[in-house]
Image (cartoon, rainbow, N blue to C red):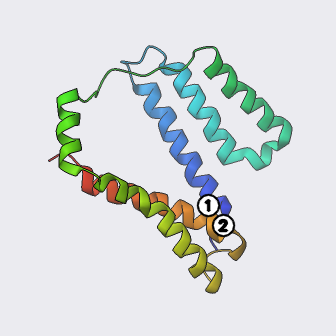
Amino acid sequence: MIGLAYIYALAGMMFLAFSALSLRDASNPKRYGNAAFWGLLAVSMLMGDRLGDFGNGLLALGLVGIAGFGGLGRGVRGEVEGATKQQRSARHGNGLFLIALIIPATALAGTFLFKRYPALVDPKQATLVSLAMGVLLALAIGYLRLRPA
């Protein structure tokens, strides 16, 4: 049965990937701070229940420390030029908002569906699981629809 543990594991793996990608970004002078930030967030998602309140509190303080003392930055590699942004914006128009609406629509539909048919998803967590499924669906459709032509 799909529950919050799977959602936390998925988020943790995503943050772990962010950490690894941040570490590889040689164009970012603060890449180690970025990697540490995303790595701590990944640890919180993947092992938060094993760390307890005190451990998660320390992780939160670490996140605040990294962000508060200017440890985060961004690289310059892969920037899209302004003219290209304008061209893509004109091409897609307001269709971008339809992708964003996939998330609440999936969350609403999944909440009703999974509470009625509880074989796949824990009925107590149907809304959060449906929300995560909506995010994944919107991400996939966004990647397919918005890829450069």
Q: Nearer the viewer, residue 132 or 7?
A: 132
Residue under label 2? 3
Callout 2: SS:
loop
Q: Is residue 88 above or below residue 109?
A: above
Callout 1: SS:
helix
Q: Do callouts 2 and 1 mark residues in contact (Cβ within 8 Å)?
A: yes
Which residue is situated farthest in the bottom direction here? 117
Q: Is residue 72 left or right of residue 124?
A: left
Instruction: Write the residue at 61% across / 40% down.
Output: 42
Instruction: Write the residue at 33% across / 54% down.
Output: 142
Q: Is residue 8 above or below residue 37?
A: below
- The image position of residue 84, as x and y in percent, is 18, 34
- Give the tally of numbered discs: 2
- Kind of residue at badge 1: Tyr
- The image position of residue 37, as x and y in percent, is 59, 28
Any part of residue 30 in sight: yes
- Kind of residue at badge 2: Gly
Instruction: Write the residue at 51% across / 46% down.
Output: 14
